[in-house]
Each structure stands twice: as structure tokens, then as C-alpha cells.
Image: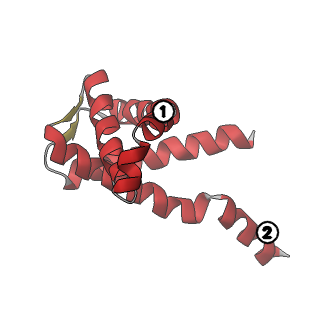
């Protein structure tokens, strides 16, 4: 039950981040709300399966750049979702980089309120 609720919340947060990215990042567009939700779902799937493999393969670059190369990986995966999904368009690397950055920041901010730490804090506050 909680796993399904968590999945729905993560997709909604990703969709919120993608929606914000389409508003503030020039070069990132989405045709419709269903496409936005599908892009959020596909981004989650790509991040779950491809991101760990890419991080492992590019570990030397990631170490040399003190972790900043992970931002490049995020941008590449963001652009990959755009290539796989009709109706979600990203024009160029800079748009993919900024769009991925917006989605990451929104997800990070939402994790403060939705993540495991926040659940523990709510339990302590109620006790």
C-alpha cells in the first residue's frame, strides 16, 4: 500500500518538476498534461535502471569532477526521455541540463516533506 502511494507521489513530484521546467527553461516543451505525466513516469524508469549503470561506467569522470559529472548524466537521461517520448521536446544540451536541474531541485525539495525523515519527524511530533 505505502509503496504504491510513494510511487504516485514520486511521479506527481516529477511531473511538477517537469511542469516547472517547461515554464522556466527555454527549449523544454510538453504538449499536454498526459504527456507530462508519461514523461515523469518514463524519467523515473530511466533513472531507476540506466542511471546507476551510467554512474558506474563513468565513475572515473565523476571522481575527477568531484561528482559534477552526475549533472551531465542527468541531462543526458532527460534528453533521452525527450527522444523516446513524442510530445516532450528538449532543444539542446543546455535545455536538457537546466531542465534536469530544475526537476532534481524540485524532487530534492519535495523529499524534505515526503521522505523517510519527514515521516519520522511527524511520528515524533504526534507522540
Secondary structure category for the residue under label 2:
helix
Q: Is residue 116 left or right of residue 104?
A: right
Query: Which of marks 1 and 2 precedes in the sequence?
Result: 1
Q: Where is 9 relative to 106, above or below?
A: above
Q: Is residue 75 visible?
A: yes
Residue 5 x/y as whole percent: 65, 43
Disc 1 crowd, CA 10 A, few/some/many (<14, 14-19, 20+): few
Q: Is residue 17 left or right of residue 28?
A: right
Residue 27 x/y as whole percent: 14, 43
Q: CA distance from mark 2 to mark 1?
A: 36 Å
Q: What colour scheme was applied to this rendering of the protein? A: secondary structure
Q: Where is 64 relative to 76, above or below?
A: below
- What residue is disc 1 on? 53
- What residue is disc 2 on? 123
Q: CB under 8 Å between callouts 2 and 1?
A: no
| Residue 84 sits in quarter | top left
Q: Nearer the viewer, mark 2 or mark 1?
A: 1
The structure residue drawn at horizontal position 55% and vertical position 59%, both measured from the top left corner, is 111
Residue 25 x/y as whole percent: 19, 52
Residue occupying the far right of the picture: 127
- Which corner quadrant holds the C terminus? bottom right
- Which corner quadrant holds the N terminus? top right
Q: Is residue 17 visible?
A: no
Residue 62 x/y as whole percent: 39, 50
Q: Nearer the viewer, residue 49 or 26?
A: 49
The structure residue drawn at horizontal position 48% and vertical position 33%, both measured from the top left corner, is 53
Q: Is residue 46 left or right of residue 30?
A: right
Q: Where is 100 relative to 52, above or below?
A: below
Q: How many marks?
A: 2
Amino acid at each position: 500500500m505505502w509503496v504504491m502511494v510513494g510511487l504516485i507521489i514520486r511521479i506527481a513530484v516529477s511531473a511538477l518538476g517537469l511542469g516547472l521546467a517547461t515554464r522556466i527553461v527555454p527549449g523544454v516543451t510538453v504538449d499536454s498534461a498526459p504527456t507530462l505525466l508519461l514523461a515523469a513516469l518514463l524519467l523515473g524508469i530511466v533513472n531507476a535502471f540506466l542511471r546507476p549503470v551510467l554512474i558506474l561506467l563513468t565513475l572515473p569522470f565523476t571522481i575527477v569532477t568531484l561528482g559534477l559529472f552526475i549533472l551531465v548524466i542527468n541531462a543526458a537521461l532527460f534528453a533521452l526521455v525527450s527522444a523516446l517520448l513524442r510530445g516532450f521536446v528538449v532543444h539542446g544540451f543546455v535545455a536538457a541540463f537546466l531542465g534536469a536541474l530544475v526537476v532534481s531541485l524540485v524532487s530534492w525539495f519535495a523529499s524534505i516533506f515526503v521522505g523517510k525523515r519527514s515521516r519520522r519527524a511527524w511520528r515524533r511530533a504526534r507522540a
